[in-house]
Image (cartoon, rainbow, N blue to C red):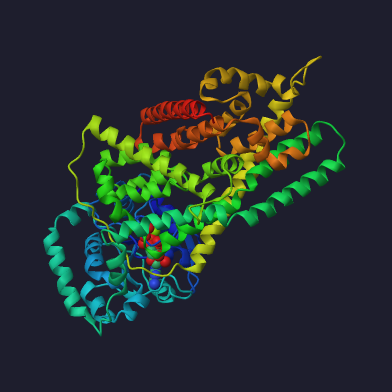
Amino acid sequence: MGALEQQVRAATKTPLIALLGNPNCGKTALFNRLTGARQKVANYAGVTIERKEGSFTSPGGRAFRVLDLPGAYSLSAHTPDEAITRDVVAGLRKGEQAPDAVVCVVNATNLRLNLRLVLEIRRLGLPMVLALNMVDVAKKRGILIDTAKLEAELGFPVVETVAIQAGGEKALLALLDRMPFDTKLSPNPLAAIDAVPVEETQREVRRILDECTSYANDTGNLTEQIDHVVLHPVVGPVILAALMFLVFQAVFSWAQPPMELIKSGVEATGAFVGNLLPEGPLRSLLVEGIFGGVGTVLQFLPQILILFFFILVLEDCGYLPRAAFLLDRLMGGVGLSGRAFIPLLSSFACAIPGIMAARTIQNPRDRLVTIMIAPLMTCSARLPVYALIIAAFIPDRKVWGMMNLQGLVLFLLYFAGVASAMAVAWFIKRTMGANRQQPLMLELPAYHWPHLHNLALGLWERARIFLTRVGTMILTLMVLVWFLSSFPGAPEGATQPPIYYSIAGMLGRALAVVFEPIGFGWQICIALVPGMAAREVAVGALGTVYALAGGGDDIADALAPVLAHSWSLATALSLLAWYVFAPQCMSTLSVVRRETGSVRYSFIMAGYMFALAYTASFITYRVALALGA
Ligand SMILES: Nc1nc2c(ncn2[C@@H]2O[C@H](COP(=O)(O)OP(=O)(O)OP(=O)(O)O)[C@@H](O)[C@H]2O)c(=O)[nH]1
Ligand SMILES: [Mg+2]
C-alpha cells in the first residue's frame, strides 16, 4: 500500500470489508440486505461474476464499505471469476487496497465443503468473521451447530445470519460495530495458502466438524426425493422438454390481453395527438415516427416479461444446475462443457451477460467456444421481431388439439438457434480438436420455493431495462429513421411514395441489391441497418417505413396486416431465418473483444454469423418460393 493511500485511509477511516465464500452460499443476498442494493441473487453457483462495492452505516453509527465478490471454492483460483476474488482479497488488484476485514459467508447446511475456503482465508492473517448463513434451513433439517465451540476452534467470531430475512443480518452488524480494524495483511499472502496441502486442510475441516456439529432427527431430504424424478435418465429429459415447451406456449397465449391493452392505449394516444396537430412534419414525426415506431416496440413488453417470469422462477428454485446436468452428455457430444449451460441460458435474456458468465468456465478453449456461440441463443431483443412476423403470417389456430401454432413456430425458432449453436460448437471441435472430456463438477443446490420478492424485483428490473431502452436508444433511433425516411421529399411527378426518394429510401435501394436474392425489398433493408444497434428497432423501423409508405395515419397501429399484405410468405420466412443467425448487436461484439482480450474474435464472430444468416435466408427463401409460398 502506498504512503499516500495509507494517509487517505487514516483520514477517512471507513473500513472496507469483503464478503467471501463458496458459490451460492448467500453472499449477494447478505450484501443486498446490508447495503439495500439490488444485485442479482439466484439459486445456482456462479451468479456473481464481478466485484461490486456498496456501503452502509451500522446501528452504532460506524460507516463501512463492503465488497460482494464472485464465489470461490478455493483461493488457488481455477476460473477467471475466482481469480477476481483471489486478487481482491489478497490485495493484488492494481489500484485497490486489500480489505480491512473479511466476512466469510458459509452455507450452514454444507459446512464440509464450505470450511475449506475459510481455513485458507484464515492463513491470510486478516481480521475475520464467520457468517453462518442459511441457519433457517439448517435448523429445519435438524443440523445443530455449536457456535461457541466453532468460534473457539477457528479463533475468530462466529455469527448466525439469514440473508433472506429482514433483520437476518443483525447479529453480524452488532459484531462489526465492536470489531477493531488494525491487523495488517501478512507479507506473502498467497504463498501462505499454498504452503499447506489440501489433504491436511480437509482433515482439519473434518476434525472441526466432529467437534462442533451434530444431527438431530434427519427427516428425509426432500431435495433428494425430487432429484430422484427430475434427474431420472428418461423422465428427466421429458420434464425438461415439457417445461421449455410450456414457456413458449405461454409467451403467446398469456400475452394477448395485455398486448391488446398497450396497443389500444398507444393507438388512442396517437390518434388524439394526431388530431390536435396540423398536417406537417411535426405531426408526421409524432404519429409515424414515435407512435408508429416506438409504440410498436412497446407492445412486446408483456411477452418479454412472461419469458422472464419463467426464467426467474427456474433460476430461483434451483432447477438450472439440474438442467445443465441433464444436458451434459448432449453438450459433451459437440465438445461443450456442461458448465456452458448457464452462460448459454443467460444468453436468452441477452448475449452480453451470457458471454460474461462464461468466466465461470475453467478451460480456456471451452470458454472461447461458449463465447462464440452465445449470440446464437435467441436474446429477448429478437422476440418482438419474431412475434411481429409470426402474428402477421402464421394463423392463430390450434394444432393437434391443444397447441397454439404461433407458439409452436416460436419454439422452433428458438430451437433453430440452439441447434445451430450446437452445430457450430461441433464444427469447432472437428477443426480445432477437442479437449479430453472433463467430468462435470456442479453443485446441485437444495430446492426452495422462488422468493416472491426476488421474482417481483427481477421482473421490475427487466421492465425497467426494456422501458429505458425504448425511451432512450430506440426512441433516438426511431427519430433518426423517421428523419432519414422523410427527407428530402418526393420530386415533381413522383410515382412512388415520398419515402422511396428519401435518404433512407436510397440507402435501402442500394442495400437491396445485396439482399434481393434472399427476398428483402428496400423497405426491409431500411429496417435492417438501425436494427444493428438494437434489434427491436427493426420492428419500430418497419412500423415507420410502412406508415410513411402507406401515407395513412392509422396504419401504424396495424403493422401486422400491412406486412401480411406487402410481403410474400417466402420473404417473411427468410427474414425470420435472418434474425436467427445474423449478428445484429454492436454491444455484443465489443463485449467479446473485452472478454477474449482480442478484437480478432469479434471479427470472426461477425463474419461467421453473417455467412450463416445469408446462407440460411437464401435456402429458406428459395425453398419457400419453389414450394409456392
Ligand atoms: N433459506 C435461505 N436462503 C438463502 C439465504 N441466503 C441466501 N439464500 C438463497 O440462496 C441462494 C443463493 O444466494 P446468492 O446471494 O445468490 O448467493 P451467492 O453466494 O451470492 O452466490 P454466487 O454469486 O453464485 O457466488 C438464493 O436462492 C437465495 O435466495 C438464507 O439465509 N436462507
Ligand atoms: Mg452472488
Instruction: Count up the numbered dots.
Output: 0
Q: Is residue 108 left or right of residue 278?
A: left
Residue lying at 49% horizontally and 64% vertically, measured from the top left: 454
Instruction: State ligand 2's quadrant.
Output: bottom left
Which of the 4 quarters of the picture holds residue 516?
Answer: top right
In this rendering, the answer to whether 38 lies above or below 618 is: below
Q: Is residue 496 left or right of residue 535?
A: right
Residue 518 horizontal/vertical position (percent): 51, 24
Residue lying at 45% horizontally and 62% vertically, measured from the top left: 313
Toward the viewer: 413 or 366? 413
Which of the 4 quarters of the picture holds residue 519?
Answer: top right
Residue 149 horizontal/vertical position (percent): 23, 80
From where the camera sits, is residue 620 visible? yes
In this rendering, the answer to whether 366 lies above or below 404 is: above
Residue lying at 43% horizontally and 65% vertically, measured from the top left: 29
Toward the viewer: 293 or 47? 293
From where the camera sits, is residue 362 visible? no
Residue lying at 58% horizontally and 44% vertically, measured from the top left: 395
Toward the viewer: 442 or 19? 442
Residue occupying the far top of the picture:
492
Toward the viewer: 256 or 52? 256
Which of the 4 quarters of the picture holds residue 22?
Answer: bottom left
Give the quarter of the figure containing the C terminus: top right
Residue 360 horizontal/vertical position (percent): 32, 49
In this rendering, the answer to whether 56 lies above or below 613 is: below
